[in-house]
Amino acid sequence: MLKQGIWKQSRISTEIKGMSVQVPKQGSDKNARKQSVPANQNKQGPGKKAVPLKTTEDKTGQSGSRRSRHVPEQIKPSEASLAKKLGQLAVSEQRPMDSRRGSTPTGRTVSQAKTTPSSNPPRGHSPLTSLRDIAGLIQQKCCKNIIVVAGAGISTASGIPDFRTPGTGLYANLQKYNIPYPEAIFDIDYFTCNPKAFFSLAMELYPGNYQPNYIHHFVRMLHEKGLLLRMYTQNIDGLERMAGIPAEKLVEAHGTFSTASCHLCYTSFPPKEAETIIMSGKIPRCKICQGIVKPDIVFFGEDLPKSFFLHSKDFPKADLLIVMGTSLQIEPFASIVNSVRPIAARLLLNRDLVGPFKRIPLKSTDVVKLGDLVDSVKKFAHILGWQEEINELIKQHDNPVETVTEVSPTVVKGEVKQRGPRGGNVKILNSPGRRRSTKAPQKTNAADTDSSSGDSNVSESETDSTASSEHSN
Ligand code: OAD
């Protein structure tokens, strides 16, 4: 797996119930060691070329530092309609607020306004306030390049816990692994000395036990409509792939279980073999250096996959960013949401306010819809009029199309072939959902295909004012 850049955690929860939490402090041995790495070096295995910590170049030639100083592009003629629709908001965040945003005194910047509570929140006057506004942009073809940024919250409806929700999150339920602090389970330094904890957890985490839910299928629908520029996910559950979002539209920024490699020399290891060994309770070893082999999921202290750096090309092109199911607490992933152009609309679908959406007032181009993600996404699909098509996608996923083929009855890589009813060969499309289903069928699919549930309470006047007012207050 190609490694590039560095994944640094920005924050560690200190309130994980029932766990003895020891947060690595600035200046602790571990951090001191990490910080003492020369600026032009990074964690690399033997034979790997060192890459700079913060100035890693991607294949586009953009550097991380350049990325953080991203300068918005000029508005092109093709973007004029979006700019017009957004009330010609192509201005810096630090601009003085205009009359549309409320009674901000002349010369006061948005960030200054944020620190001074206003008794008259300007949120209601902003050009974009609701799911309906965002849906309108899509319907009017003002948004043709949509980026989705996702986290563990999109998979909770599939039965997979997220990481940080108090009580139910993974990090609140790792007591049995006897680790010093929850995130140690994904810390490369801890793993090097104590790999067993991760491998025990990996037996539960391996994809195959869970099914994609309505949210994954919604993103697939964005792709089917030709609107998905890219999905950036932090999830390692593989549900995006299972939902049929093609590899080229997907950046699995925190890695994947679908490949494996030695954590010392990065030599690839057959993923199926790694899975078999891990599922039998053993630890796979590198055939070259005898180092421990792990699935290519990105641990704290490891580099993100090269594909992550596509964001420096993608985000300036986006006209809509949909952020969903993430606490935006882990860098560098969290910061990419700030690299869209100022005129691009951003929609947060989540239970909590996170990242830049905590800002009061919200940016004029930002919309927040708080609440359960499946409910919100169903409402969004309802407004867009996509329910039937999404339900059809879900049906296809649950009952993959069977096609009669003429080829001989052999097993072809990536496909399972069985004898067909007339002696022909039936090709069962490679639906990962069929891989293993040792656990009870997950919620979602049957319920999610019921378009009447959850959508029927969407009225014409639905404006997400709840979310807005929750935020404003
Ligand atoms: P978190 O657990 O930090 O955040 C999940 C977010 O989703 C929270 O804001 C929840 O409130 C929200 N959420 C959960 N279920 C929801 C639901 N049904 N409806 C609406 N919102 C819901 O997960 P991530 O942000 O993905 O690293 O965490 C980032 C990274 O931290 C992960 O990639 C992981 C972890 O260390 C690795 O896997 C190696």
Image (cartoon, helix red, strand yellow):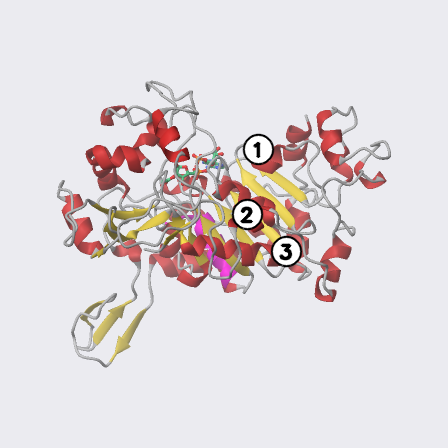
Q: What element carries label 2?
A: helix
Q: Is residue 449 visible from the viewing direction of this image?
A: no
Query: Which label was assigned to residue 353?
Result: 1
Label 3 environment density (alpha carbons within 10 Å; few <14, some 14–19, many ≥20): many
* Residue situated in front as seen by the camera: 181 or 455: 181
Residue 289 position, x and y percent, is: 16, 50
Q: What stretch is highlighted in magenta?
A: 212-223
> Dot 3 corresponds to which residue?
319
* Residue situated in front as seen by the camera: 282 or 131: 282
Q: Is residue 410 visible from the viewing direction of this image?
A: yes
Residue type at the position of mark 1: Leu
As measured in the structure, the alpha-carbon distance from the residue carrying label 3 to the one carrying label 2 is: 23 Å
Is 378 magenta? The answer is: no
> Dot 2 corresponds to which residue?
65
Residue farthest to the bottom? 406
Query: Which label was assigned to residue 90?
Result: none
